[in-house]
Image (tube, coloured by chain):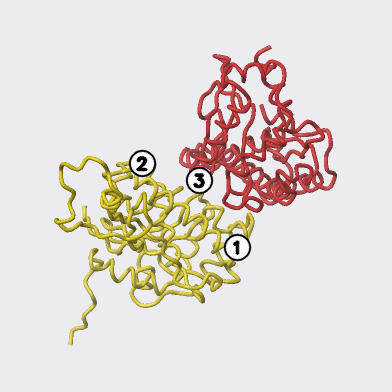
Amino acid sequence: MSSCNVFAPSCHLQVFLANDSCHALYNLKAPPFMLPSPAKKQSSPFDRRRRASKAVAYFGLKPPPYQLDALEPHMSKKTVELHWGGHHRGYLENLNKALAKDDVLYSYTMDELITVTYNRGNPLPIFNNAAQVWNHDFFWESMQPGGGGIPELGLLDQIEKDFGSFTNFREKFVEAALTSFGSGWVWLVLKREEKHLAIVKTSNAFTPLIWDDIPIINLDVWEHAYYLDYKNERAKYVNAFMDHLVSWNTAMGRLARAEAFVNLGEPNIPVA
Amino acid sequence: MALRSLFSRKSLAGLSAASRTSSCLDSRALGLAGLSQSRGLKTASLPDLPYDYGALEPAISGDIMQLHHQKHHQTYVTNYNKALEQLHEATLKGDVGTVVKLQSAIKFNGGGHVNHSIFWKNLAPVREGGGEPPHGSLGWAIDTHFGSVEALIQKMNAEGAALQGSGWVWLGLDKETKKLVVDTTANQDPLVTKGATLIPLLGIDVWEHAYYLQYKNVRPDYLKNIWKVMNWKYAGEIYQQECP
């Protein structure tokens, strides 16, 4: 199983200095001459400050690559604010809180976290938060203002090869989204072993990364993703996503990177 | 058990007409011209709410109640009936593949119908006793099993808040051991999927559609407030039936 993932984890690390007594920044390593003499028993303020300075690094919340109202009217600013600022941020904070207590998992990359905490089908509690952070980052980047339409170049070729036509793919994707019971996600993935594109439904936080497949786009079908804008009319939401929001540019880039890891066939080099 | 009362004391006239119309349309759409009943297939129908949509305010808004009942529950009923028809045909033809394929749709939509039918009866406006703590044998059983009603509420709220994705949190009665249990189910799985002897006394819908318009992503607030319109009387009646 290849351990290197095509996608750089999109959450950047922020470094915090964990200081339980003071708020100011201190050097990480105290110069030798400042070390207290062993005979000194009573604690001085200086000792406290030196013990307290320790660098810890947690994940940060990456904003969508467009303004919060840029997806109007298909996805309202209110929805993006609540979805990104409430749900996505909530998963991230819970993830960081859990990592603060876990010495083993702390300092893993996002992809490692997801694979390890998936625990071969018996996910640990941290899995939900880690996977949902990843899924939502991927989701915001899978959309763009003025999106929708039809992909081009290699992605279109591959879709036509694997689904017959773009129309058929679109139909299958919408059908998958509408027959997804409960909360979950719908994905267009490149299957690593089978070397072709496929539509995959996952429930709750699960992601094709756990099967080592390469996601190309995803669609959030948890109710919180569309309820404020569309109430129960999931079909309208999915169609709005396909017609106006999905970023085929991003998808094309992702497929191009995926081709570095999955051989999709020989290129057609014309013979002179 | 939940399906036994498909009619309620106070029916909203417009709603019952709408549900009759919609079930007629289903039959026509399936090309059966209303014959589904005569073939022995008892299809489901949307039960009326025993109270107005706005009667549970401010705990649950009228908008949510209307959407929840008229759209979500109605969709479960419609899709269950569709799947049931398809299952019937596949069974008659001996098409095992299709029979198996339809199981998830039946479980999901049928479960949704069962669960929501119980849910409407679990709620009551304050002026009709909603929120009044349980008396009698149920109250006594709760104190024995959980210590107090508050402890039970806390436990159910904790489990409801921790539930990932969509599902339900239940107060159930194990009719064999006569013990009260708190359990959760995923998606629209009815409580029996967690134990064949479990009878639901109270269920709380923690799907996002049950609270999102009013409480947004703050599920704990919804869970705190729903107890103000909880119909303990109904739960008490069911309990007394099983444990006289």
Residue flagged by tag 1: what amino acid is it? Lys
Which chain's colour is red? B
User: Going by the image, does B34 lie left or right of A165?
Assistant: right
Which chain's colour is yellow? A
SS label for mark 3 = loop
Q: Position of residue B201 (x, y in %)?
A: 64, 26
Up-down: is B46 above or below B146? below
Q: Chain of mark 1?
A: A
Up-down: is A100 above or below A74? above
Given contact means CB atoms under 8 Å apart, are the residues at marks 2 and 1 in contact?
no
- Please identify the quarter of the rendering in which residue A212 is found: bottom left
Provide the residue designation for mark 1.
A236
SS label for mark 2 = loop
Residue nearest the observer in this picture, A66 or A36: A36
The label on residue B107 is: none
Residue flagged by tag 3: what amino acid is it? Gly
Residue nearest the observer in this picture, A196 or A182: A182
Residue nearest the observer in this picture, B175 or A37: A37
Provide the residue designation for mark 3.
B165
Q: Chain of mark 3?
A: B
Q: Is residue A190 visible?
A: no
- Please rate how many residues cluster around mark 1, counting C-alpha atoms within 10 Å: few if below 14, some from 14 to 19, many from 20: some
- The earlier-in-sequence mark between 2 and 1 is 2
Q: Is residue A235 visible?
A: yes
Residue flagged by tag 2: what amino acid is it? Pro
**Front tag of 1 and 3:** 3
SS label for mark 1 = helix
- Please identify the quarter of the rendering in which residue A196 is found: bottom left
Q: Position of residue B107 (x, y in %)?
A: 55, 38
Q: Residue at x 28, y 53 (%)?
A: A53
